Image: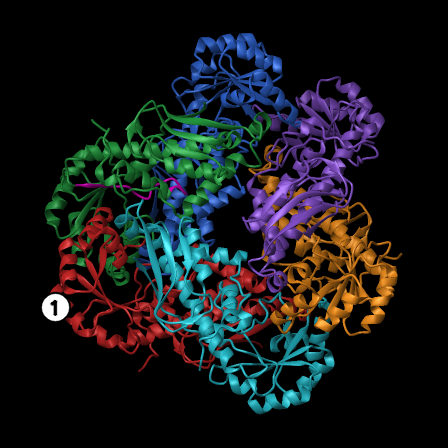
Chain colours: A cyan, B red, C orange, D purple, E blue, F green
């Protein structure tokens, strides 16, 4: 597998600037630094300045350089972070950024910055691997809402940097009628009809089904997208045939890097993987004072 | 490996009640629910009530039931969460909690609650496996500061529930002089001496070394604990012999579930694993309306 | 015009429970009460309790009773608010709610509660009038993002209570490509194509046009919805004919209660009115201790 | 009516810098932008810069230019806002400010900035009209606490920019004994006497009355200001005569732009209008990329 | 001196319920408890419950019992605080409150609660002593803005509980023109005249002077209150004579418990003491588990 | 007593940069300025700039200059604060800092800045006096948790600036088993043993005792530090003899500047004084526009 290239459509991806990222960075710095960095205050003079490097020690996609900058800036805006490689590029054993500024701030912000970088790079790396596995199909690989609490926008950004796509950002971002909603509403038709009454011009409705009969009911009820949960490959192929383009189809449930290509080849429009965010590893980086 | 028993010392472990957990729960609910749960508002009547179950679908240690309760309560204090198994118990394919209350609140809080539960149970499960791997030694297994940003106290709680121990909670919780500090301070002796001047009665000083000569210098400088970073087993055994009880020794760097027992048998006092928190998997749970 | 009836589809409308409403209520109470209600503290004994009534003094739709309760509860959870009429009902010169609890809390929360109620009832009343003006057409009347800063979810709720529909909730809730975006992107086709690359399964793309040629370009580019800005009735009719069902059409720009019916009759799918929120009046209510 | 001139005493008026304005701007940006501006991120390159103009499209007093700057700066401090007309000046069909900076930031902040500007200009315009209506009397026109929740300091600023005066800013800013307080305290004399015991050197006490007998009681009790609620012109003239300068008189209740001059001519010291803030219109502005 | 009695006018004094008190309690608990009470979590079982007493160990006025309750409730709302003596009563060597609830919560909240109680009781005790020193004069003793940062409303509450009065609560609570303002405005007359243009009906203007000539200028300019800073007794008596009731007079600057009576006897209307808040001692209390 | 010199080990002391200081500064500015500085806005033009001096008017250690800067910067980052003397230096009747910037910001921030400076300088001055009183012994003087709520890190910083040392920062910063814990745990041995099970490598356990028998029990249980509460000098000397270096000893309870030297001479390792923070005076400073 050649994972070295950055897909063209990643280019416009930018680090999220939303409120919640600021709140998370704040929380992360607060929990690590608390009342102050005792070791650094005791061993490093207040007026000392330094240059440091962040080194990538494991193969994968680097993701999170803008967050690294945000962490250091939130701690002390005298710290300057200079990325040395492209966000989203694949690499190994390389220097990915240079940090310059007050030594104390560099050392105090180090762990929080690296913790973000390691996790986001892990998500982007897995996403890149999955994206390449389906590169020869037309399918769009989607993430889910199975993200780390508080990290939703960051992890969904890492998914895009990796080359996959985002499903809805939250419960307010589109209607996806799942098994529990159907049960509470008294059936697919009732649930879909209630949902359609509230859609805005830019919204579609998606419903989760498990049988072809439910697929028929969903199509008749007027949805635009149908999610097949935990279906085997034969069922997916049958669903694609039955849908015949009248709705778009999403396959979901237990898909992994190993199985995603086979699922993609069934002809579904979307495959979603919770694993992109809940089971991605962590990439190893270290910070060293020069 | 028999991982079914709960170590006795886990009993007093309780879910953290600190400020930061509340802030994280708030952030997590906000990012998922945003302006409101469109699907649930459209398909479930406001006055509907329900009972649901959370089912564990994968073998491991359940951890996070108090957080599940906190999430639902933060969203709607009419929701009642009843744990059906002990926090910290090992199990599989079982119902771990029952949720009763307004149907809308149950469905809107579901994903956030499960995301916490899955992640913490993953950390506790790995910690349990590691704890059992070293059960016949005297070593204490420690976590590190390589935690998910914003989740520090929760993940350290999961480590305790799993049966391991916590290293310092943050940069304000004890002095650990690492390579970068030594470089900035101009040597081990200078750094340690500066640190000792600021210690409170209840604090020790720990220093990171890589050679026996540095170990000697650290002992002479007066530290109480020495961390050997990335040392092989022979080096660790040599360090244990040289220290001869004058300081306590911690082995760190790249230790995994597979290698922890061998490291523990070198005679060090502590082994720390970043992997406990940065590489733990996620346990699968689902919520189903009855 | 008979505005006394509550449209059936208003029923499931519920007051928003999102974070931002809590923050706004907090801000509103803080700005009015500041360091404490001097008059009430000086003239009313701390242990005094009372019952009060909120009276509607002007004809219109009452909207905001759940917010009234939330304001009083946020100030003092001993205050009990009992609605006496249905949220969304049309009325005049009537008692809409009874308030019971500590006299001080009732008097201190009065103005903040009434300020919310008056404003939301004004929006709901205008929305009801507009909804009834187009009741015999198939058009959906939409609000816009021209809402009072900080009051977005509340005002959009009032629009629904009044019987109209919501357009997108914010910039993250669907893509609407406007004139400035087209200019920045270098044309309709370029902008739409960039947008379509980022859509999730549940999202459509809408684009703003002013001529039939632009409408053709938008349809060719693949959008699902087209907004005609500031078009006269003839242009709208021509656009409906040209679109021929291939895209949905939204008319916008300067539409008022007086003109909405004529616009609706052109055959467009949606009409949006900024006036629903930025030019709605305020309904008069008062609170009187019994 | 010539409303083109800016009254001299408006000059020192400056935009409020208080905490609550920052919180409201934050809330407003958060509710509009949420997880990010999808359209702009998809259609505008991250490194694009632009210049835009804000155009006033309706006759009135421009008010809120400093808030426009604050909104853009809060979103991205690289945006530079240059006012081209004086805050508080009357105009129509003109460019009131130029905005330069990152194109994305300009487009993402546009709606929030304009929503503030439109509303505050509406309040200032009505206030200017009212101020000019009473310009030949000695009366001071006051606002009330019937402001938009969360917008108190901003709207009271707009009232001053328009040329009227501010009544108390909140419940902690002076004692105004109203009908409900009198009822709870057991009469005017009891209420006033309790209030006077708590006044600081810089505070007066005001009481609301509806009859000349109550006016007599209030004066005897020692208040400095008396508010006549919903009184007709004859009653106000009678009250002015009876007070004979022993207390200052405020007329309030249902006064509008049409009736304010007649009320002012009764000889009262103050007239207060809730309408200044709760019934002001919204002035139309637009932002256009050059 | 007999300080055992509670002045009648203290009765209606109640603990402030404003936003800022909640924020301070939150901050205080957060700084003390941080990531959790290690000792209590290690030594006390989670399900243990207990009753404890707060004992006053030094003679003085107890003040802050409602804050004690608020602290415990903020930490754990299962804790019940029962005051056993009247807020504002003078005593010594007595039990002032009983605390019942979870043992852990009682021990974790103890120090924060006592720190508030000790400080507020110190302020109330000094205020009581000062109030009694001037009891036979007509003077009102006032506090100043020299309060502990963040504790303004609490300390001003303690001043009232002690029997003195509050000067303005903050810079937004009345205009007091001091030496620096006069210098910036170009003289007393200019400053006062600018101030009078902005006063609301319930506001007076106060100006600081140091000579009789300045007093004359202030009176001519139209102020209602004049503050004499650091004047000796003879100067104060001369000022009282010159003012002759045309303005009220406040003496300020370096007044202490020892000198307040002499100052009061000069005939001024008010004496203000920064010492009430910045130099009050701390009263000793302890909490003991029964 | 010569208190003019700054102890060498004070040098690295720096003002805390933690989250909680920012929150307290925010709270302090908010409570003083509220909706705006009425006097300054009325009497000083918006575009006026000025230079001011802060003058120390009482002998003592100046402490808090970095907080003064932080207060002004938080209010308006155009204000420049230039310290003219060293933080921690002893002086009297001198100019300690120069402030330059917008006149309004200088006057509005003045009181909050001075309130911090006066209080911290009071704590540092008393700490300096105590440190000098024991300068010829080996004892370390410690503060306690009896600090002003919300001011913990600032006051502990002032203690260090004065030349004393900090005990634990909060309940999460080391285990100190006090009488109530012992009671709840069922004895010293039980409590200590539970505590030792939870200690991290860098933590010691301290226990409070009142008799030699308890000291024996504590030593046998394995603690590293023992606190003698309210012991007389003979008891302390006996404890020192009995401990014989096996544990470190801390004397606490009612120690003052007058008695600290005698306690120090008993040979204990630490003396802790609540008085350092709860009974320090306030140093007098004033700000004058040049």
| Secondary element at image label 1 | helix
Looking at the image, residue A223 sits to the left or right of residue B222; the answer is right
- Viewer-side residue, D102 vs E99: D102
Query: Is residue E126 placed above or below D275 in the rendered structure?
Result: above
Task: Name the one closer to the observer, B22 or D206.
Answer: B22
Foreground residue among A135 and B137:
A135
In which quarter of the view is residue F263 placed? Answer: top left
Give the percent coordinates (x, y) of residue D87.
Answer: 67, 36
Which secondary structure dominates the residues rendered in magenta?
loop
Residue C216 horizontal/vertical position (percent):
77, 70
Give the image location of residue B191, x and y in percent. 22, 52
| Residue A201 is one of the magenta-drawn residues | no
B147, above or below D225, in the image: below
Residues packed near mark 1 inside 10 Å, few (<14), some (14 to 19) or many (20 plus): few
The foreground one among A44 and E3 is A44
Q: Position of residue E153 (x, y in %)?
A: 50, 36
**Over which residues does the magenta segment extend?**
F139-151
Q: In the rendered view of the protein, which quadrant contains the C terminus of chain A?
A: bottom left
């Amino acid at each position: 597998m050649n994972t070295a290239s950055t897909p063209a459509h990643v280019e416009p991806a930018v680090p999220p600037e939303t409120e919640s990222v600021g709140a998370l960075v704040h929380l992360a710095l607060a929990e690590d630094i608390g009342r102050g960095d005792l070791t650094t205050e005791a061993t490093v003079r207040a007026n000392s300045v330094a240059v440091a490097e962040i080194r990538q020690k494991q193969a994968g996609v680097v993701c999170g350089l803008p967050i690294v900058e945000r962490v250091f800036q939130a701690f002390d805006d005298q710290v300057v972070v200079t990325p040395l490689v492209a966000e989203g590029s694949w690499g190994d054993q390389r220097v990915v950024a240079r940090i310059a500024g007050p030594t104390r701030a560099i050392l105090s912000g180090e762990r929080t910055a690296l913790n973000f970088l390691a996790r986001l790079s892990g998500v982007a790396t897995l996403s890149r691997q999955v994206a390449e596995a389906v590169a020869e199909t037309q399918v769009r690989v989607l993430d889910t809402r199975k993200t780390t609490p508080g990290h939703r926008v960051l992890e969904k950004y890492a998914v895009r940097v990796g080359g996959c796509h985002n499903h809805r950002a939250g419960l307010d971002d589109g209607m996806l009628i799942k098994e529990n909603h159907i049960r509470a509403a008294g059936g697919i038709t009732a649930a879909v009809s209630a949902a359609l009454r509230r859609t805005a011009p830019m919204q579609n409705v998606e419903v989760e089904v498990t049988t072809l009969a439910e697929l028929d009911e969903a199509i008749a009820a007027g949805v635009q997208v149908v999610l097949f949960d935990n279906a085997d490959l034969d069922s997916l192929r049958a669903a694609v045939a039955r849908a015949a383009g009248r709705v778009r189809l999403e396959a979901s449930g237990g898909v992994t890097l190993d199985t995603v290509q086979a699922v993609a080849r069934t002809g579904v429009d979307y495959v979603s993987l919770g694993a992109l965010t809940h089971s991605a590893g962590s990439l190893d980086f270290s910070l060293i004072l020069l």
